[in-house]
Image: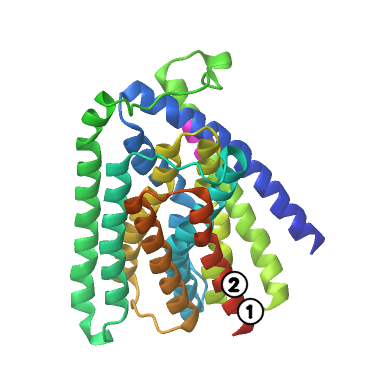
Amino acid sequence: MFAAILLLLAALVIVFLAAQAFTNAIEHLGERLGVSEGVTGSVFAAIATAMPETIIPIVAIVAGGSNVALNHAVGVGAILGAPFMLSTLSIGLMAWFAGRRRGWREAFTPESGGMRRDMHVFALAFLLVVGAALMPSAWQPVQAAIAALLFIIYFFYLMDTIRSSQGLVADGHATEADDALYLARLFGDAHWVAVMQLAAALALLVWGAKLFVAGVEQVSTLAGVPALLVSLLVVPIATELPEKVNSILWIRRARDTLAFGNITGAMVFQGTVIPGLAMLLIPWHIDDVYALAAILMTVLGVGWLYWLHGTGRLQPRHVMLNMALYGAFVLFAVIH
């Protein structure tokens, strides 16, 4: 147990340092490409930092162990756990750090159009994902069609986000780096240096997340926690670490568009591409009480965030309710 705890601590240090280098590199690349903070946060950072939670369910489904049912449970749990964790714990942690740093009543100011687009697309996609999971098993062709539709939705989301970038840059939402490129001291300030730093930081993020998962699995095995519950509750904590740390770093520097876009953009990616792949690879059916509870908390978290944004009440003290939803799920898991 002591070795597993040391592994968890080492993984956290690796993820934190890698996230520092990642955010620095992604800011420089966004600035050099002349794109808006919306593109940098919702597309570049969201897809890149989504790699750990993308890899785990795919590996579990395609190249897991001999227990196919267990592999599917881990895959489905990780897929549903990603948006659940992002919409509750990740958003809540970001609000907590912002409240401590900037005040609990100071409103968040993410670029409105981009955040609204992210939440609209995620809500539509998640409705399709959950609807497909509740269909009879004989409706697999319909699920395949829904999977194709999810891929199309994400493609048009990307096009719309990129298309709106030029206008946002003109309105003062261009990506700007706060600090010099870290590796510039060693290799100069060329574009390839920024790309190299980004790739190295991303590799460290994935490695740190995998180390964390390994430590969590050791602890959970000793505790005898069910596989689906681990994949819903525990695995996403590790795999979402890049988004959490990146967004916390950005929110503490009042870079709200980047901070929110990193999370909501990852939710869109996790709510379209990954479940779409799963529908084509495994029987996509959900009837477990933990999975249904996670779906409910995700819907409540996104709905609350959407209402706060629409009414101008997007403040840390209000967004902390999203963390309370995560706590409610943990309590349910403990007493069930």
Numbered disc 1: secondary structure: helix
Q: What kind of residue is marked 2?
A: Val
Asked whether, in this view, residue 309 is left or right of residue 233, the answer is: left
Where are the magenta residues, as a range? 198-202
Q: Main secondary structure of the magenta part?
A: helix
Horizontally, residue 214 falls left or right of residue 94, namely right
Q: Residue at x 54, y 60 (%)?
A: 323
Q: Which residue is mark 1?
A: 334
Q: Where does residue 161 sit, x and y in percent of width and height?
A: 25, 41
Tell me the residue at 79%/58% (across/down): 3
Residue 312 in the image: x percent, y percent?
37, 48
Residue 330: give its label: 2
Q: Residue at x 19, y 62 (%)?
A: 149
* Screen quadrant of the N terminus: bottom right
Residue 45 screen position, x and y as percent: 41, 40
Q: Position of residue 288 (x, y in %)?
A: 45, 83
Residue drawn at x 33%, y 26% is 174
Three-letter residue code for mark 1 = Val
Please tell me whether residue 137 is drawn above or below residue 30 in the rendered image: below
Left or right: 171, with 215 as reference point? left
Is the Cβ of the residue at disc 1 closer than 8 Å to that at disc 2? yes
- Residue 159 part of the magenta-drawn span: no
